[in-house]
Image (spheres, rainbow, N blue to C red):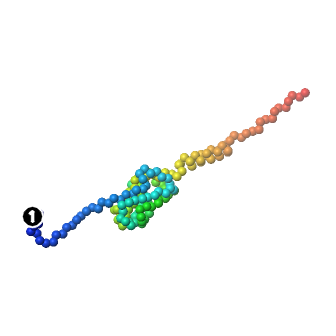
Amino acid sequence: KKEFQSFEGEVKFRIVATVVSDFHVINPPMGLVTKRGKNIPVAWEGFRPGASVNIDLYVDGVFAENLATGVSGNTFEWKVSKKAKYKKDCQLRVSDVRNKNSFAQSNVFNVKRKIPLVVPYSTLALIGGGAAYWFLRPEVFDPLPDPPGPSK
């Protein structure tokens, strides 16, 4: 304070700060297991009001595909592709269209087949077994007729 008592003139300050924001993906919830072809509601919060966002899918921490671009609001309905190849460790990343550094990632979730592999293979085995039986079944012969009775 003593050093500045005799100072006269203009003082300029430069303030440098790191903005910490609270972006969250609320849905899908942690541990979700869904099936191909199902809809997943995606919800987020913390972005600036009116912000448009991009929604990307990451599998095992690696970008897999863009699900939506320029979504307004704070919800999106994602229909999981019926032909999806991904299975485990999926995450959604919601990022501000104007600032890619403003983003939030969902909890990890898993995607299962719509019909378990056992169903098509067991059906195929049943049909194949029936066809094999039909074509390879033993031939049934008519029994020999009874011999004629003794003559009188």
Q: Residue at x 36, y 67 (%)?
A: 98
| Horizontal and vertical percent position of residue 57 | 42, 58
| Horizontal and vertical percent position of residue 130 | 64, 45
Query: Judging from the image, what secondary structure is the residue with disc 1 in?
Result: helix
Query: Which quadrant of the structure image shows residue 58?
Result: bottom left
Position above or below: 56 against 30: below
| Horizontal and vertical percent position of residue 131 | 65, 46
Q: Which residue appears farthest toward the bottom when viewing the image?
A: 9
What is the three-letter code of the residue carrying label 1? Answer: Lys
Position above or below: 111 against 151: below
Q: Total label count?
A: 1
Query: Which quadrant of the structure image shows residue 90?
Result: bottom left
Q: Residue at x 43, y 50 (%)?
A: 31
Q: Which residue is mark 1?
A: 2
Of residues 93 and 144, the one drawn nearer to the viewer in this rendering: 93
Left or right, residue 50 beside residue 115: left
Q: Is residue 27 visible?
A: yes
Left or right, residue 51 beside residue 35: left
Crowd tier of the residue under label 1, counting other residues whose Cα lies within 10 Å: few below 14, some 14–19, many 20 or above: few
